[in-house]
């Protein structure tokens, strides 16, 4: 997969936290895993992989809370609860942002459904993109 990226900016619902990061254009997945469904309170979470080394908080970093468990860190705004990003303790290992938190123009689409083996029983993933039982091959390369 190519590593073309776009500098995007995002924020939480209450606006207290604003960030920018270089998002990788073609590594965007609808993740149907149980952890994403629970933590987002949704049928799935659309996550855009990004270069964690380029993450910069414009404001509100002191309000960022982290839930650590299930193989990574899930970060959210402690004021409004918006889920913002997922990363390993070492942000260079893997890093993704919740695409719904991105405010800047970012003309991309999810390329695949991930972890459909643990999808919600009451939701059918889009058939316009490929579904994978786990993460698509090469997603984390
Ligand atoms: Zn907030
Ligand atoms: Zn997930």
Image (tube, helix red, strand yellow):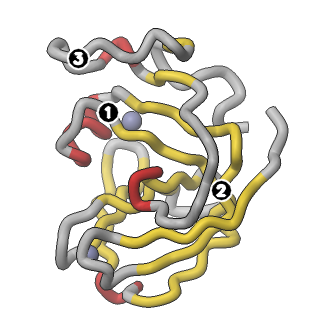
Q: Name the residue at 46% across, 12% down.
A: 133
**Label 3, ligand 2: CB separation under 8 Å:** no
- Are the residues at dot 1 and dot 3 in contact (C-beta closer than 8 Å)? yes
Q: Determine the CA span between mark 3 and mark 2.
A: 28 Å
Tell which quarter ligand 1 is in: bottom left
In the shown orientation, is residue 11 left or right of residue 139?
left
- Of the 4 image quadrants, the one containing the N terminus is top right
The x and y percentages for residue 116 are 38, 16
Q: Is residue 106 above or below residue 20?
A: above
Query: As rendered, which of 10 and 64 lies closer to the eye?
Result: 10
**Label 1, ligand 2: CB separation under 8 Å:** yes
Q: Please give the residue where the numbered disc 3 appears in the rendered image.
A: 123
The x and y percentages for residue 105 are 59, 60
In the shown orientation, is residue 115 left or right of residue 37?
right
Q: Please give the residue where the numbered disc 1 appears in the rendered image.
A: 44
Q: Is residue 132 above or below residue 34?
A: above
User: N-terminal of the two: label 3 or label 2?
Assistant: 2
Q: Name the residue at 46% across, 10% down.
A: 127
Q: Determine the CA span between mark 2 and mark 1.
A: 19 Å
Q: Please give the residue where the numbered disc 2 appears in the rendered image.
A: 23
Using the rendered view, name the quadrant where residue 16 is placed. bottom left
The x and y percentages for residue 33 are 34, 28
**Label 2, ligand 2: CB separation under 8 Å:** no
Task: Give the SS element for disc 2.
Answer: strand
* Other residues around mark 1 within 10 Å, as few (<14) / some (14–19) / many (≥20): many
Q: Name the residue at 43% across, 59% down.
A: 85
User: N-terminal of the two: label 2 or label 1?
Assistant: 2
Q: Is residue 116 above or below residue 29?
A: above
Task: Give the SS element for disc 1.
Answer: loop
């Amino acid at each position: 997969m190519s590593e073309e990226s776009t500098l995007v900016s995002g924020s939480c619902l209450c606006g207290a936290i604003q960030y920018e990061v270089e998002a990788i254009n073609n590594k965007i997945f609808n993740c149907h895993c149980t952890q994403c469904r629970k933590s987002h309170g949704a049928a799935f979470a659309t996550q855009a992989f990004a270069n964690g080394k380029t993450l910069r908080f414009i404001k509100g970093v002191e309000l960022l809370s982290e839930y650590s468990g299930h193989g990574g860190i899930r970060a959210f705004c402690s004021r409004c609860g918006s889920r913002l990003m997922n990363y390993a303790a070492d942000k260079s290992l893997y890093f993704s942002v919740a695409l719904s938190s991105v405010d800047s123009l970012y003309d991309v689409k999810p390329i695949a459904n991930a972890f459909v083996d643990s999808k919600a029983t009451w939701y059918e993933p889009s058939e316009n993109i490929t579904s994978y039982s786990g993460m698509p091959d090469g997603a984390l390369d």
